[in-house]
Image (cartoon, helix red, strand yellow):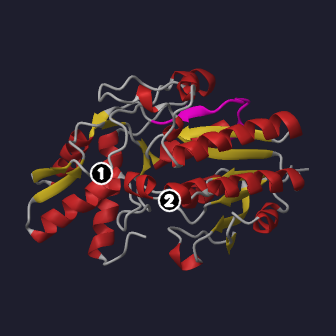
């Protein structure tokens, strides 16, 4: 007799990563029976047929109980978040996501869920370790002593601890990945919640299309980051969920670039050179952040397969088509 496919719930399925994750899980043979997001269905980045797509506010405990009913696996990606501009200006909203994760953990326990995945963030890392552009790659232990990104980072760090204690006290198997700057097609590219790769693609395309060959960059452009393409994120997420790694683990690229270098890449893709101006008063986050992938390579053999240049080409072409079609960036 064939063993039935595991059933899954994806929380935050109307968002960028969540929408991709639903499709990825189904392609791998997992039966995603429910996809949930607070946004109205018409505002989702992607919707998948054959799935119960629900618009629910998972900050509410009863909504979480409804969402978790009858599922083996919970992928908890739901959060009120965006790029650095949103995070720095909406700290209270970001922290209210603690209600979503707390209530989803309670619902998962009550409904007998087998495994619970939580998407944390590199924003949990101690800010004093990220003051230089010459970033030393952050290893998992660098989250403590705690000094995370104000608002969003504190919520993520607290929720990591909740997952740990739900496993220790109640036996709910929890797995936690610290995402480092995920990018790719079908994400937000304007409106205030977009992250650097999408924002730069949009700005370069608009400069080329308008004939005004100028670009404004937040910060001095020397701040460093690593960016992980969505396909690598999806593979790593499933590997972590299925693993026996009980501590939070990095999931990101170690291909470090400055924001100026990221603009160079997009200009080269677009076939244009732009005059740069710098807004030193704009939100720019930490000066340097990179992912130390030693642990995930050792434990799971995972490392990114898609170079930044290749992933940015795919992202650029998608945003280019969206703009040509007159679509909004959600």
In the image: residue 316, left or right of residue 64: left
Residue 313, label in figure: 1
Please indicate, yes or no, whether residue 72 appears anywhere in the rendered image. no
In the image: residue 124, left or right of residue 26: left
Where is residue 47? Give x, y as percent: 57, 70
Q: Is residue 243 magenta?
A: yes
| Element on which disc 2 rests | helix
Q: Nearer the viewer, residue 274 or 324?
A: 274
Please indicate, yes or no, whether residue 32 appears anywhere in the rendered image. yes
Q: Is residue 15 magenta?
A: no
Above or below, 124 against 53 in this view is: above
Q: Earlier in the sequence, mark 1 or mark 2?
A: 2
Q: Residues within 10 Å of mark 2 (few under 14, many from 20)?
A: many
Evaluate if marks 1 and 2 touch, with contact meaning CB atoms under 8 Å apart. no
Above or below, 133 against 49 in this view is: above
| Element on which disc 1 rests | helix
In the image: residue 309, left or right of residue 165: left
In the image: residue 48, left or right of residue 308: right
Residue 16, label in figure: 2
Above or below, 202 against 249 in this view is: below
Where is residue 1? Give x, y as percent: 91, 50
Q: Which residues make up the magenta segment? A: 241-252
Where is residue 280? Give x, y as percent: 22, 47
Number of on-image labels: 2
């Amino acid at each position: 007799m064939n063993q039935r496919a595991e059933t899954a719930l994806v929380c935050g399925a109307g968002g960028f990563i969540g929408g991709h994750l639903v499709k990825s899980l189904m392609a791998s043979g997992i039966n995603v029976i429910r996809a949930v997001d607070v946004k109205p269905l018409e505002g989702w980045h992607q919707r998948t047929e054959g799935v119960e797509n629900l618009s629910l506010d998972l900050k509410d405990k009863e909504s979480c109980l409804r969402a978790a009913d009858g599922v083996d696996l919970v992928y908890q990606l739901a959060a009120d978040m965006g790029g650095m501009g949103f995070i720095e200006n909406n700290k209270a909203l970001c922290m209210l996501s603690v209600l979503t994760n707390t209530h989803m953990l309670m619902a998962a326990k009550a409904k007998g869920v087998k495994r619970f995945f939580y998407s944390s963030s590199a924003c949990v890392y101690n800010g004093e370790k990220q003051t230089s552009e010459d970033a030393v790659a952050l290893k998992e232990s660098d989250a403590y002593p705690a000094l995370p990104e104000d608002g969003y980072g504190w919520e993520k760090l607290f929720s990591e601890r909740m997952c740990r204690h739900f496993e220790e006290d109640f036996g709910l198997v929890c797995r936690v990945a610290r995402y480092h700057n995920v990018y790719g097609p079908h994400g937000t590219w304007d409106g205030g919640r977009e992250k650097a790769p999408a924002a730069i693609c949009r700005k370069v395309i608009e400069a080329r299309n308008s004939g005004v060959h100028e670009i404004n960059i937040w910060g001095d452009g020397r701040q460093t980051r690593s960016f992980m393409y969505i396909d690598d994120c999806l593979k790593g997420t499933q590997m972590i969920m299925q693993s026996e790694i009980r501590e939070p683990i990095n999931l990101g690229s170690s291909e470090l670039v400055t924001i100026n270098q990221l603009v160079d890449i997009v200009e080269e893709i677009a076939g244009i050179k732009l005059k740069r101006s710098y807004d030193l008063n704009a939100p720019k986050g930490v000066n340097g952040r990179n992912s130390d992938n030693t642990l995930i390579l050792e434990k799971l053999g995972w490392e990114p397969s898609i170079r930044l240049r290749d992933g940015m080409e795919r992202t650029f072409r998608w945003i280019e088509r969206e703009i040509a079609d007159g679509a909004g960036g959600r």
